[in-house]
Image (cartoon, rainbow, N blue to C red):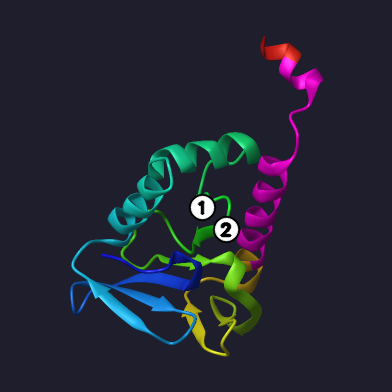
Amino acid sequence: MFFNIYNLAAIHYDKKQRLSILTFANGEILTSKRKPVVLLNYLCLSHGSTLQGRIASTQFVLGIKQKAPVMVCLTMNCSFFPTQSLRSEGCVWVQARLVTNTISISSTQTRIMITDNSWVDVDIGIRSVKKQLERCKEYYTRITMPLDKGKLSKII
C-alpha cells in the first residue's frame, strides 16, 4: 500500500463493509481489509517506531493515560488522534494538521472540517475534539523543544 500520509485526513472502520476507510484531504478514498490500528502501526513502522511505541511516548510526554494521539511522522507533523478507545470499531483517527474547524452537531457529535472543505462527522462532543487537537499541538511542541538540562540531570 503506497500513499502520501501527508494528505491522509482520517481512518475509520466500516462495520457493514468490514473495511477500513481511508479519507484523503483531496477527496480520494481508499479501502483496506486491515483494521485502522494495523494500518497505523504500518505507518508508524514506516517512520521508525511502532504504534505502541508512539502511544507510550505521547503518554509519557503529556502525562496522559487514555486516547493518546499518535505522531506518525515528526518531520511532516503528521499526528492522528483517536475519537474513541483505541480498539473500538467506532473510533475515527483524524490527522490533526488537516483540521481547519470543528462544528458541534449535538452534545455527542462533532463535524470536523478538513482543509479541502470536506468533513468527517464523529461521535464525540466538540470539547473532546478540541482537547485532542490541543494534545497533538502540545506533544509536537514538547517533542521538538531542546531537552531541559535540569530534568535530564535528575534521571542521570
Q: Is residue 154 above or below residue 111?
A: above
Check if residue 156 falls in the magenta segment. no
Q: Give the left or right position of residue 52, taking residue 35 as reference.
A: right
Q: Is residue 124 above or below residue 38?
A: below
Secondary structure found at label 1: strand
Say which amino acid is labelled 1: Cys
Q: What residue do we see at 47% from left, 74% from top?
A: 123
Name the residue that disc number 1 marks: 73
Closer-to-camera residue (146/142): 146
Gap in Å between the C-alphas at discs 2 and 1? 6 Å
Name the residue that disc number 2 marks: 76
Coordinates of residue 91 in the picture (x, y in percent) = 39, 65
Coordinates of residue 134 in the picture (x, y in percent) = 69, 58
Residue 32 in which image quadrant = bottom left
Predominant secondary structure, magenta span = helix
Secondary structure found at label 2: loop
Closer-to-camera residue (137/106): 137
